[in-house]
Image (spheres, rainbow, N blue to C red):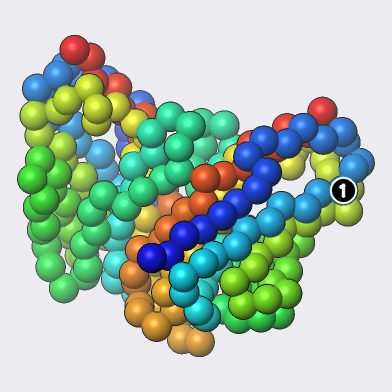
């Protein structure tokens, strides 16, 4: 099955600096890569996703890159703000016929933005 | 609009007691349903998923079971809880008609087995 590794497990940055989280996946058939943000005590929520037919996607201060050959993808947060403090999860999935898709999550990165 | 309800929010149970966590989805039909567990400081582990009534797929062997008695109802159960069952349990749903669409998570149940 799919295996997703995520690094680092914790990341502390100064407000205004950039944060980068990296993930690798094992199944070359995976074609969908979402990122979820989980604030303390709350449910995970999708913040951005990328499909295998593109290499980069940006939404305001957040960008994701995908390298299919190397099987890794990254989340970039620029101009970090205190409200960016949370746990971030990467995930990978592929469509499994008649069974929908199953997201395999990375272990999470706890991001702390220091004011 | 679609909503997902999960209860209870917190639960403290003794070892060996039974468990029943319930999740319901409103505003959609034929959803794919999922149960995830999040151990403290760890990632999200998929436990079960269902693509229809009575159809359950288990991802990891464990002390838990799942059932889907109705289209929008997903139940996580155990006959006898273990200490290792402690964790944060999240129910989630996805539209079956669309491939790779995002998951919507419930608010979670914090289970402590003592």
* Left or right of B15 in this view: A25: left
The quadrant holding residue B57 is bottom right
Q: Residue furthest bottom?
A: A98
- Residue B59 percent location from the top left of the image: 62, 64
Q: Name the residue under label 1.
A: B18
What residue do we see at 74% from left, 42% from top? B85
| Position of A61 relative to A50 (above/below) | above
Q: Where is residue A38 in the image (x, y as percent from the top left)?
A: 39, 39
- Residue closest to the eye, A7 or A86: A86
Identity of the residue drawn at 12% across and 68% down: A54
- Residue at figure coordinates x 25%, y 39% from the top left: A21
Farthest residue, direction right: B16
Q: Is residue B101 visible?
A: yes
Chain letter of the residue carrying label 1: B
A45 is higher (above) or lower (below) than A17 = below
Q: Where is residue B27 in the image (x, y as percent from the top left)?
A: 46, 70
Vertical order, A108 against A16 (above or below) = below
Residue situated in front as seen by the camera: A31 or A29: A31
Q: What element carries label 1?
A: loop
Q: What is the quadrant of the C terminus of chain B in the image?
A: top right
Q: Which residue appears at 51% of the width and 67% of the height?
A: B26
Kindly give the residue lying farthest to the top in the view shown. Answer: A115
Q: Around disc 1, counting alpha carbons within 10 Å, would you say few (fewer than 14), some (14 to 19), or many (20 or more)?
A: few
Residue A99 image offset from top left, x and y in percent:
52, 80
Quadrant in which the N terminus of chain B is drawn: bottom left
Q: Residue A33 sits in which quadrant?
A: bottom left
Total count of labels? 1
* Residue A70: quarter of image: bottom left
């Amino acid at each position: 099955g799919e295996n997703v590794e995520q690094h680092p497990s914790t990341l502390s940055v100064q407000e205004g600096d950039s944060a980068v989280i990296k993930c690798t996946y094992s199944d070359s058939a995976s074609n969908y890569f979402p990122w979820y943000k989980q604030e303390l005590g709350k449910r995970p929520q999708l913040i951005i996703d990328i499909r295998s037919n593109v290499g980069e996607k940006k939404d305001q201060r957040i960008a994701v890159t995908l390298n299919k050959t190397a099987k890794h993808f990254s989340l970039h947060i620029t101009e970090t703000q205190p409200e960016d403090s949370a746990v971030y999860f990467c995930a990978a999935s592929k469509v499994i016929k008649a069974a929908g898709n199953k997201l395999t999550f990375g272990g999470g990165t706890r991001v702390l933005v220091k004011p | 609009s679609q909503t997902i309800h999960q209860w209870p929010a917190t639960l403290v149970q003794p070892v060996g007691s039974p468990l029943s966590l319930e999740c319901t989805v409103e505003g959609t039909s034929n959803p794919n349903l999922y149960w995830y567990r999040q151990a403290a400081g760890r990632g999200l582990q998929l436990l079960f998923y269902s693509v229809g009534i009575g159809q359950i797929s288990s991802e990891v062997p464990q002390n838990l079971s799942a059932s889907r008695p109705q289209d929008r109802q997903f139940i996580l159960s155990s006959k006898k809880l273990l200490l290792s069952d402690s964790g944060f349990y999240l129910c989630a749903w996805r539209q079956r008609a669309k491939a790779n669409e995002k998951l919507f998570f419930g608010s979670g149940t914090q289970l402590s087995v003592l």
